[in-house]
Amino acid sequence: MSDHEYKRHNKTLLLYHLVFPVKYRRGVITKRMGNSLKEICFEISERFEINFIEIGYEEDHVHFLVQSVPSMNVSEITRVLKSITARELFEKHLEIKSKLWGGNFWTSGYYANTVGQYANEEVIKKYVESQGEKKKYTQVFKGQPTLF
């Protein structure tokens, strides 16, 4: 389970599920390349405030479960991950260039979704709707910190 990030004036737990397809949906990711990708991500986590919870891949796309801080939005996280991983993979695996021409490893698009640890959309919606009412929804968050 992920830990909260503590900064001077805030406490956050921001988790994102990101999916990056390979350019042209080519099946170029091998087990050896997947291991390189994980090593590269470890180096990224040391340089940036991006924590990799899980990394999974198939031949033509990669899934990341990452945790970051509010000062980095999803677009910035994506830009950092795509640019550094592509550059490093091209350098470490020269065979990629014959399958992916034009110098692009990833497609220009991506999939992003937030991941909730304490509640889903419906629970939060009810909580927000109930603001100002007498009744409390503390049973929904039983045993979990409620910082809203």
Image (spheres, rainbow, N blue to C red):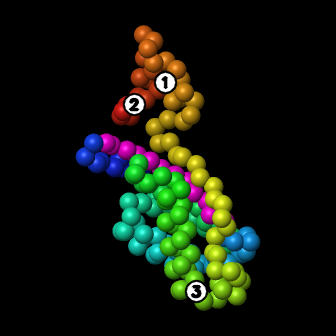
Q: Earlier in the sequence, mark 1 or mark 3?
A: 3
Give left or right: position of 102 versus 135.
right
- Label 1: which residue? 127
Give the number of marks. 3
Q: CA distance from mark 1 to mark 3?
A: 50 Å
Q: Determine which quarter of the picture holds residue 110.
A: bottom right
In the image, the segment drawn in magenta is 10-21
Q: Is residue 133 magenta?
A: no
**Which image quarter holds the C terminus?**
top left
Seen as rendered, the residue at the extreme top is 134
- Of 65 and 94, nearer the camera is 94
- Label 3: which residue? 93
Figure check: 123 above or below 104: above
Give left or right: position of 11 versus 58.
left
Q: CA distance from mark 3 to mark 2?
A: 46 Å
Describe the element under mark 1 as helix, strand or loop: helix
Which residue shows up at 44% across the image and 14% down it? 132
Seen as rendered, the residue at the extreme left is 8
- Of 127 and 49, nearer the camera is 49
Q: Type of residue at label 3?
A: His
Q: CA distance from mark 2 to mark 1?
A: 10 Å
Q: Residues within 10 Å of mark 1 (few under 14, many from 20)?
A: some
- Label 2: which residue? 148
Q: Overall secondary structure of the magenta stretch?
A: strand
Give left or right: position of 55 versus 68.
right
Q: Type of residue at label 2?
A: Phe
Rendering coords of residue 50 (x, y %): 42, 60
